[in-house]
Image: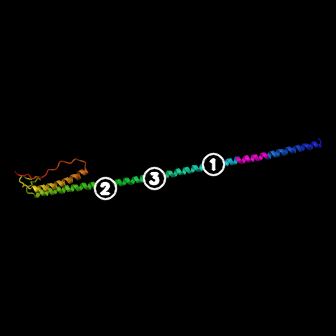
Amino acid sequence: MDTTTLIWVIVGIVVVLAIVVVALLLTARGRRERRREHQHEHAEKLRADARETELQAREHEAEAARARADAAAASAAAEAAKARAAEAAIDAERRAGAIDEHRAEAEGLRQQHAEAMRKADDIDPYADGTGARSTAAPPAAAHADDARDDRDTVLEGTERDRRANTDERPPTPPERHEHTERT
């Protein structure tokens, strides 16, 4: 081989190497760009996942806060219901005590009335031992009417008290001590 040919072969190899180097440099730059883009996309995906996770964490925290608030409201409502129940129980006891007081007061008035009637019968010379008037009693229409009105008023008052405390029908009126007039 002569020298010229050898020079041309060396030049050809150098040119081919130069083309290969230039081609590698051009493709390496593209590969670097693609690698950067791929890394950037991967980083963006990780950021999006992190934001999504943070949003889910906030939602769970909000749900937990809402559940705490609901529990506190339910607890407050339960406490209010307990307070109302306690007030109702106290009111019922107070009213039951008032009913017992009224009943006892009415019974005391009835006993006073019975005692007053017994004393009146003891003092009255015309009354026999049973509380009935004897036939020999003098006519005392005016006095008997006043006494009858007083007894009726007391009986009506005690009867009203008894009816207010029970749902019974009123009993037949008690026997009255009436004067029988002689004719």
2 or 156, which lies in front? Answer: 156
Residue where numbered disc 2 is placed: 94
Tell me if 161 is positioned left or right of 37 in this view.
left
Locate residue 125, reporting x and y percent: 8, 57
Query: Disc 3 or 2, which lies upstream in sequence?
Result: 3
Category of crowding for the residue at label 2, using alpha-carbon neighbours closer than 10 angstroms: few (below 14), some (14–19), many (at least 20): few
- The residue lying at 38 percent from left, 53 percent from top is 84
Give the spatial CA distance, label 3 vs label 2: 31 Å
Category of crowding for the residue at label 3, using alpha-carbon neighbours closer than 10 angstroms: few (below 14), some (14–19), many (at least 20): few
Q: Secondary structure at mark 2?
A: helix
Query: Disc 1 or 3, which lies upstream in sequence?
Result: 1
Per the picture, the main secondary structure of the magenta-coloured stretch is helix
**Which numbered marker is on residue 48?**
1
Q: Residue furthest right?
A: 2
**Which numbered marker is on residue 177?**
none
The image quadrant of residue 157 is bottom left
Kind of residue at disc 2:
Arg
Locate residue 32, reporting x and y percent: 74, 47
Locate residue 45, reporting x and y percent: 65, 47
Give the spatial CA distance, label 1 vs label 2: 68 Å
Is label 1 in contact with label 3 (beta carbons under 8 Å)?
Answer: no
Kind of residue at disc 3:
Ala
89 or 31, which lies in front? Answer: 31
The image quadrant of residue 138 is bottom left
Category of crowding for the residue at label 1, using alpha-carbon neighbours closer than 10 angstroms: few (below 14), some (14–19), many (at least 20): few
Q: Secondary structure at mark 1?
A: helix
- The residue lying at 25 percent from left, 51 percent from top is 164
Magenta span of residues: 26-37
